Amino acid sequence: MPAAIRSKARNAAAGPPPIAPSWPARSIADLHRIIGQITAGAAFRCLQQGGVDTATSTGKLMLSILGAVAEFENDIRRERQREGIEKAKERGVYRGRPTTIDGAVVAALCAEGLGATAIARRLGIGRASVYRLGAAE
């Protein structure tokens, strides 16, 4: 949302500022939550699809149907992706990301008495990676 609109919305006396989610709704519940926030002081109306207007019962139904279809398509995409990954694993093609950190080196540095931060600095890795390997506990 442009800064000029945000400042006008903050200064407006009529209700909360408009909500501009940075990502689309990921489920029907999320869609209804976002629309509920938007419609707290106004109605949502899609200008490109005249039937989607939360001020009417028909518009609310249309919005729910569109959201349900979108969620259905997302579920189908996820299922196909999961099936593709399983088939690739069976063929031995999909192995995941190769390891880049030698756990033995991290364990050896920990045995020398170095802390997680020092190990991370010396190896050029994140401190969380050292903790994930369990060597610096």
Image: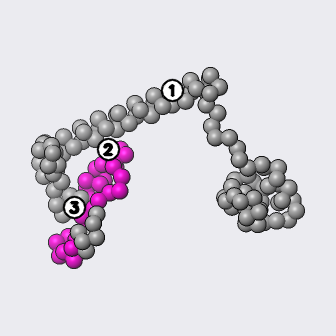
Residue 27 appears in the figure: yes
Determine if the magenta segment contains residue 34: yes
Question: If the image is split into quadrants, where does the N terminus sit?
Answer: bottom left
Query: Which of the two labelled residues, at mark 1 and mark 2, occupies the earlier sequence position?
Result: 2
Q: Amino acid at mark 3?
A: Ala
At a point 14% along the width and 49% down the height, the residue shown is: 47
Residue at 51% x, 31% y: name it. Answer: 82
Q: How dense is the environment of label 1, judged by Cα within 10 Å: few (below 14), some, or many (20 and up)?
A: few
Which residue corresponds to the image point at 82% horizontal and 49% vertical from the top-left? 104
Instruction: Read off the residue under disc 1.
Output: 83
Res 52 → quadrant: top left
* Label 3 element class: loop
Within 10 Å of the Cα at label 3, are there few (<14), some (14-19), or many (20+) other Cα atoms?
few
Q: Is residue 47 above or below residue 39?
A: above
Residue 112 appears left or right of 11: right
**Residue bearing the label numbered 2:** 28
Measured from the top left, where is residue 23 in percent x and y?
36, 52
Could you tell me how far apart the alpha carbons at marks 3 and 2 are, in whole angstroms?
18 Å
Residue 2's quadrant in the figure?
bottom left
| Distance CA(mark 1)–CA(mark 2) | 24 Å
| Residue 109 sits above or below residue 65 on the image | below
Residue 101 to residue 74: above or below: below
In the image, which disc is placed on residue 40?
3
Q: Nearer the viewer, residue 78 or 33?
A: 78
Q: Residue 3 at x, y = what percent? A: 28, 70
Image quadrant where one finds the C terminus: bottom right
The residue range painted magenta reads 8-37
